[in-house]
Structures are given as structure tokens and as C-alpha cells.
Image: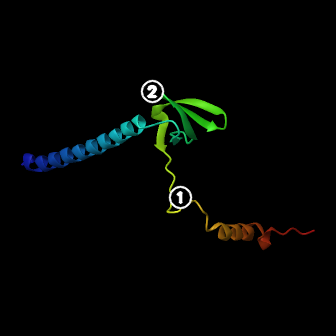
Amino acid sequence: MDLVIFLPLLIILGAFMFFASRRKRKAMQATIELHSSLKVGDRVHTTSGIEGTITGVSDDNVELEIAPGVVTTWLKLAVRDVIVDDIDEDDDVVDDTEDTDYEARESTATEITESPNSKTDG
């Protein structure tokens, strides 16, 4: 009787482990491909959040220019991703970071800072 209950659980656990390891293997392969494709001139993000341009590549390291004239050496493993600029049909850079709610947030902040309860008697 215990085998009838145990066998389906074992099958479910085995399937879960198979798909989890497969997903991990795909992620590892993508990381390996990213690090092997790095080349001079690529703009990248590091795992610590620094953005820079690759000025040199060796087997295990990359040199990143993080500011004009400031070049630092990083392990390739520290490179999280390559920055890809979105280009529209007119070859203009598309800025997806435009903040359309700026005025709404600014007026809300003004209302909060100018609340009637904050007046002082003088």
C-alpha cells in the first residue's frame, strides 16, 4: 500500500528535479556564451551595477572604462549583461526611460509639502 502512495511522489519529484536542472543548465550555457562573446567596444553592466565600455579582453578578465580615462580590471564573471541600444527606423536611439508621470508626482509632492497643517503661528 505504501508503494502506491510513494511511487507517484517519486515520479513527481524526479520530474521536478529534471526540469530544474535543465533550466539551470540553460542559464549556465547562456552565461558562458555571453562571456565568450565579449569584445572591445561593448557596453556592459557588472553584477555590482557599474556600467562601462570594454577596452580590453583577456582569458579571464575584461578592462572596463567606467569614466573618461578611468579603466578598471574585472573578472569576466562579474559581467552581467551587454547593453544593447534600441534603434528605430531613422537610426535614432530610442529612449524608453522617459518619465511621463513626472508632473503628476511633482504636484503630489508639492501638495504634501504645502499642507495646511504645517503652517506655523507667528
Q: Which residue is mark 1?
A: 91
At label 1, the amino acid type is Asp
Q: Quadrant of the C terminus?
A: bottom right
Measured as percent of width and height from the top left, residue 42 is found at: 51, 41
Q: Name the residue rendered at 13%, 46% in the picture.
A: 6
User: Tag on residue 60?
Assistant: 2
Q: In terms of secondary structure, where does tag 1 sit?
A: loop
Count the numbered circles shown.
Answer: 2
In the image, farthest residue toward the left: 1
Q: Residues within 10 Å of mark 1 (few under 14, many from 20)?
A: few
Q: In terms of secondary structure, where does tag 2 sit?
A: loop
Of the two numbered discs 2 and 1 in the rendering, the one whose residue sits closer to the viewer: 1
Measured as percent of width and height from the top left, residue 23 is found at: 30, 45
Mark 2 and mark 1 lie on one chain; the one further toward the N terminus is 2
- 15, 9: nearer the viewer: 15
Q: Name the residue rendered at 24%, 43% in the picture.
A: 17
